[in-house]
Image (spheres, rainbow, N blue to C red):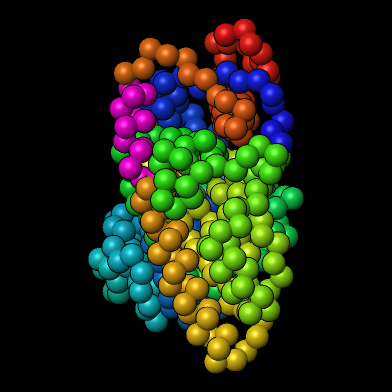
Amino acid sequence: MFTNQHYLRHLLRPEHYTSESHYRAELDHLFLPAWHPLATLGDLARPGDFLTFDLLETPILLRNFDGELRAFLNVCPHRHSKLTEKQRGNSPRLRCQYHGWEYHQDGGTGKIPDARAFRPWDRENSCLRRFRVETCGDLVFVNLSDTGVTLREWIGPLWELWQSYGGSFRHAATWEQDFPCNWKVVLENSLESYHIPQVHPKTFKDFSPEDISWHELDEKFTSYKTIPPNDFASRAQAWIARRLGHPVTNEYWHRNLHPHTTGASLDTVRMMQCVFPTGPTTCRYRAIFFTLRGQRRSPFAWVLSRILRSIATSVAKQIFAEDATIYQGVQKGMAASPHTGVIGTREERIYVFQKYVLDKCRVRRELPIVEATHDR
Ligand code: FES
Ligand SMILES: [Fe+2]
């Protein structure tokens, strides 16, 4: 059942999806305090493995130092070069690509070519800028702020659930794509099932009736649970879960931890999705996808888990591609819209999300918030 029984106001105005000043406010108030899922432990399994990202206008280097994960600004204190332009790799030492300065895991300098040329040594201004790194299950999170809550505090009530990313679920694939739309267009699309018949007629086909749809609306997160139809795909999934020794619930869960991190799950898959603003009207979507590994160790279970990984990843990417067809049209509409917009009860999670955005950005609302009303 939905929490609201009447439509809700669309709290955000089209300019909140286009303006530079609101984008800057969101970076400061929503994204700097946030923890961002960027990788899996498997991505950085060996000493010397590294990944780089452009995260919120900040170049990041994530690296395994003898088993310890560290995140640094990917900028060298010598003369500002990026330490590396590679997206991933393995190197025995963290060494700048330009003049070869080397760095230890605390960010301090190691070997400096022709070090005598830099006497007296300015230790304070020669360290890499470091960021906080923490893990939940197999997921590696980075935070760009030196202060603020721990990852566990940030994830809060979803901590136990998100620890299952890993364990009996194996990392199957990671993919990302840039879109010509504000990040909230992508996120809000994920918060409602109303678009399913129109955008996913062949994959999801239709949204669930209200009597088997449950919304949880919390200040920190919203969630949606439903029981997918008892069709061939659901029965096949239940069969695979049983064969791999995993309990069968037949439930689909979708949980969005404000502002931008979403965990979705079925009995055989887990998906962690994140959408990052890259400008007022552009964003980058990133999905880290897991499939059931299975408790049973047998050649049959191994083959089954491989087939599951292949088919489930392909279906997830297909759904992702279907959603991707709509984003640019929504953004173009935003830029020209004279309307205030309206949110239906099936979309009520969007209302909670928009309220969160406005509250955190301390934006004065032009309209009073009305939880449920016929008065437009
Ligand atoms: S800019 Fe990095 S060593 Fe010179
Ligand atoms: Fe969708």
- What residue is at 41 percent from the left and 27 percent from the top? 17
- What residue is at 71 percent from the left and 70 percent from the top? 247
- Residue 100 seen from this side: yes
State the predominant SS element of the stretch in magenta: helix
Front-most of 372 and 290? Answer: 372
Q: Is residue 62 above or below residue 279?
A: below
Front-most of 145 and 271? Answer: 271
Q: Is residue 213 left or right of residue 90?
A: right
Residue lying at the far top in this picture: please name it.
375
Q: Quadrant of the C terminus?
A: top right
Q: Is residue 88 above or below residue 334?
A: below
In the rendered image, residue 130, in percent from the top left (x then y), is placed at: 50, 58
Residue lying at the far left in this picture: please name it.
98
Q: Is residue 353 left or right of residue 71?
A: right
| The quarter of the displayed image where residue 68 is located | bottom right
Q: Quadrant of the N terminus?
A: top right
Which span of residues is magenta-colored?
323-335
Front-most of 210 and 305? Answer: 210
Q: Is residue 263 left or right of residue 196?
A: right
Q: How many marks?
A: 0
Front-most of 88 and 233? Answer: 233
124 inside magenta stretch: no
- What residue is at 55 percent from the left and 92 percent from the top? 299
| The quarter of the displayed image where residue 159 is located | bottom right
In the rendered image, residue 264, in percent from the top left (x then y), is placed at: 58, 54
In the rendered image, residue 268, in percent from the top left (x then y), is placed at: 59, 67
